Amino acid sequence: MSQQVRVRFAPSPTGPLHIGGVRTALFNYLFAKKNNGTFFLRIEDTDQNRFVPGAEAYIMEALEWLGIAPDETIGKNEKFAPYRQSERKDLYQRYATDLINSGNAYYAFDTPDALDAARKLEEEQGKTFIYNHTNREKLDTSLVISTEETAKRIADGEHYVIRFKTPVNETLYLHDIIRGDVKFDTNLLDDKVLFKSDGMPTYHLANIVDDHLMETSHVIRGEEWLPSMPLHALLYRAFGWDAPQFAHLPLIMKPVGNGKLSKRDGDKMGFPVFPLDWKTDEGTSSGYREKGFFPEAVVNFLALLGWNDGTEQELFSLDELVASFDLHRVHKSGAKFDPEKNKWFNHQYLIKQEDATLAKAFSPILLEKGFDVDESKLTKIVSLIKERAHFVSEFWEMSDFFFEAPASYDEKASKNWKAETPELMQDLISVIEEIGDFTSLNIEIIVKDWMTKNEIGMGKIMQPFRLSLVGALKGPHLFDIVEVIGKEETISRINKAISSL
């Protein structure tokens, strides 16, 4: 790729970063790194009415946590500063005026009441109101009033907007990297507002101006922006600028039913749709980080929502994703979000973790429950349980018997406790008391040898033995449990089971 690749993620700070936005950021990041380019973050905060305090910091923190931090942004390698659109607003007036002067835009003074009346009139005739070539010269615009009157009304403080003058009777043939060739009839487009009298541009103008000035080579964004593609292409043409290449990503769809995954779906359906917790006065919307997901797992499953490398491989490190990523392999159709598959990914990354690392993560949970466990012992316990866990938060429920004797016994499993069981358990205690090398393998050899010599069936010993130590027929290899809890505790628990059951 001869052109220097520069791509951006340009969210609005109107709340927490939705997982769909995270995927857009990720695909931009992967494309930049694959092509030795630059990934930058721009904050599009021109809509001050929807600005939410804390949202910008949230976006930054989320990208850092995921390991896809931008190369350039606010306070970092500010080659094209500022990176907040609200701090660039002086630029936009000049470019809006350039469009007026070149005949590609015009002033519109229509009041909300006047527009409402025009809309109702169209509807009464069975038509849909579109502000474009069909009526722009019948409305209150600078296309029908003199230059002097236009200047006077602006000077008098009258509210206005600047609208783009969409060309008439033209078919636009455009190319999208993901969707191929697409065409648009300009007669069906409306004259979008580009600039408001409060001095702030709309998304359309600010986006185009900033992408040009920041030398954006490719615009990789969500499918919902595909209808804006003709306007943006026309704006580049009106300014006399080369347009970037466009790629519109498929929607992320709900796990069940139709429609795209929304910010409200997560807590309603019981899974996160935000990278980090988002707290408001109304409550907390859960995030992947606080739910115990590894950032690598989140990146991995998001990368496969709408893209694959053409193989059956599912587990990719970030470096592997960079090496494999190709926009031409992004799907056109929406990608179904699967919360259970997300958990599967997290399980895969959990079992890859070092036992000692997981033990450190588990330790605070144990401390809350009153257990200060030796690091080497805890590391051993983690090694025995992690294969069956999706999250570190599940460790306690899977391993509580390592730290405290069972307070009760599973009712169904207790049916394995027969009339002859207490005597057999007493004999087992005698065998255990004589074992010197109290390691899992040695204990297993000695106990099974005793059972064989005395012609005792496996079921008569092993199930009551496990029930005594765990309180249920669950857990890792029985003799690993025996080794970890030790001889004294093992005998104590068997004696407790004899007296209780």
Image: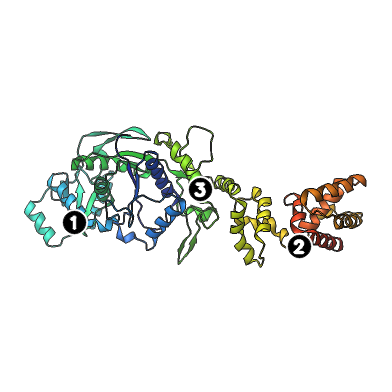
Spot occupied by residue 255 in the image (x, y as percentages of width and height): 52, 45
Estimate the spatial distance between the alpha carbons at disc 3 and disc 2, rounded to whole Å: 36 Å
Q: Residues within 10 Å of mark 2 (few under 14, many from 20)?
A: some
Q: Residues within 10 Å of mark 1 (few under 14, many from 20)?
A: many
Q: Is residue 491 left or right of residue 38?
A: right
Spot occupied by residue 291 in the image (x, y as percentages of width and height): 54, 56
Q: Is residue 375 left or right of residue 280?
A: right
* Disc nearer the start of the sequence (3/1): 1
Looking at the rendering, which quadrant does residue 229 occupy? Answer: top left
Estimate the spatial distance between the alpha carbons at disc 3 and disc 1, rounded to whole Å: 49 Å
* Disc nearer the start of the sequence (2/1): 1
Q: Amino acid at mark 3?
A: Glu
Question: Which label number is shown at residue 203?
Answer: none
Q: Secondary structure at mark 2?
A: loop
Seen from the viewer's position, the closer of residues 246 and 424 is: 424
Q: Amino acid at mark 1?
A: Tyr
* Disc nearer the start of the sequence (3/2): 3
Work out whether residue 240 can be spotted: yes
Q: Residues within 10 Å of mark 3 (few under 14, many from 20)?
A: some
Q: Secondary structure at mark 1?
A: loop
Which residue has dot 3 on it?
Answer: 296
**Do the residues under discs 2 and 1 have CB atoms within 8 angstroms?**
no
Spot occupied by residue 457 in the image (x, y as percentages of width and height): 88, 45
Spot occupied by residue 155 in the image (x, y as percentages of width and height): 11, 60
Which residue has dot 1 on it?
Answer: 160
Which residue has dot 2 on it?
Answer: 405
Q: Is residue 120 above or below residue 238?
A: below
Residue beneath the point at 86% across and 58% down: 433
Work out whether residue 471 can be spotted: no
Q: Is residue 170 left or right of residue 459?
A: left
Seen from the viewer's position, the closer of residues 136 and 72 is: 72
